Image (cartoon, rainbow, N blue to C red):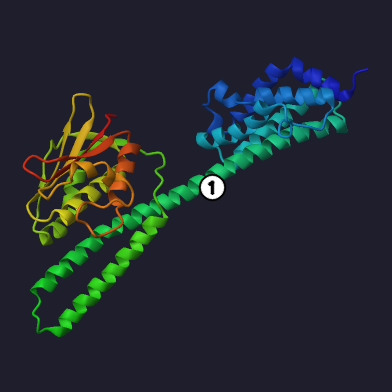
Amino acid sequence: MATSTQNLADLLHLHRFSLLDVWRAEVRKMPVASKLDVPTLNDHLADLILDLIQQLREGGSETLVESTDQEHLRQNPVFHGLQRLELGFDLEEVVVEYNALRSVILNLAHEHRLPVDLGGLHILNRVVDGAIGVALNSYAKRMQRQTVEKREENLAFLVHDIRSPLAVVTTATRLLESRQSADDLTSQELIEVILRNASKLDEMIVTVLHQTEPSVSELVKRTFALFPLVSNLLRDLAPLAQTAKTELVHQGDPELQVTAESHRLMLILQNLVGNALRHAPGGTVEVGALLKADGACQIWVQDEGPGVPPEQRQKIFSKFEKLPGSNAGFGLGLAIVRDLVEAHGGEVEVLEASGGGSRFQFRLPGG
């Protein structure tokens, strides 16, 4: 004679498709789920219902979370939690959709006047609550990891940004030192204090950069005119260029459009132009861009310095590799450039400029 739990299993098996229809209608009441297509919304719920039916028929104590012979079922709530995170669900909404399934099942039993005994209710709660626990755990762990990565990334970029104005202060102070009278001991002592503390600050910045290597999360790209961004950057770096006795030249079509995340593109160019001013002072530093036939945008920063030997042109984009003849920093700037360019789907290289010097150039795919 069939038991109450077995009757519930048979009822769920008979109505499992219409059960999903009713469940979807309930879940779609949440704005975050209102426009999801059926496969995305269903996710693993059909498998979860089948697992519940099996547990009700067998009356066993294992669920999809505990079973050792249903790996694909046990993993589904893990992926479900991660999928819901990517879709923009919050933790409460993940719980709501599982609880909606529980309610729909109980309502179905009530409509068919099928009593659910304590044994059946226990199995139902164990399966659904177990899935909730696994889904929430995977959701929370990924969300925590993303939060940590974003915080470390922002810290690393912020700290690296500080180095540019600090370089201006240091360069201007050294220029002042070179013009200072040897008899003015008070001013000389003050200059030494500035330089000493600027050096300490730079060391602390490098230490933080060392400890918080940036992890590039998903970029938020948009299409915009490149010319104004470069113009603003060169204006900000003008004091450093003046102290380095270097002319900044801006080449490119004012109408040229690029698809990128503007803040990170600014970081790329800031690193490349800053390096050119520090390591190849004097002469001209040119920043230019052009649209390639394949729709990609090629951007370059070219100087008139000593150049980079061919055997070192790949290594300098690795962490802790310095530019030739450089004793400053830890060699993180070009590594950050490479990471950010590659995050945009592009590539970066350094070539010998015509007439001598270095030409750092990178390509960004079209939008």
Secondary structure of the residue carrying tag 1 is helix
Tell me if mark 1 has few (under 14), some (14-19) or many (20+) residues whose alpha carbon lies within 10 angstroms of its own. few
Corner quadrant of residue 329: bottom left
The residue shown at (75%, 26%) is: 52
**Is residue 40 left or right of 299 when viewed as pictured?**
right
Give residue 75's position: percent from left, percent from top: 64, 31
Corner quadrant of residue 258: top left
- The quarter in which the C terminus is drawn is top left
Give residue 98's position: percent from left, percent from top: 67, 33
The residue shown at (63%, 37%) is: 135
- The quarter in which the N terminus is drawn is top right
The residue shown at (8%, 58%) is: 245
Give residue 62's position: percent from left, percent from top: 78, 32
- Determine which residue is flagged by label 1: 144
With respect to residue 222, does 16 lie above or below?
Answer: above
Corner quadrant of residue 317: top left
Q: Can residue 157 be seen in this view?
A: yes
With respect to residue 287, does 193 lie above or below?
Answer: below
Farthest front residue in view = 311
Q: Quick one: 136 or 228, which is closer to the camera? A: 136
The residue shown at (27%, 68%) is: 199
Q: Quick one: 8 or 335, which is closer to the camera? A: 335
Give residue 355's position: percent from left, percent from top: 6, 42
Q: Is residue 110 visible?
A: no
**Is residue 332 left or right of 189 when viewed as pictured?**
right
**Is residue 87 left or right of 50 when viewed as pictured?**
left
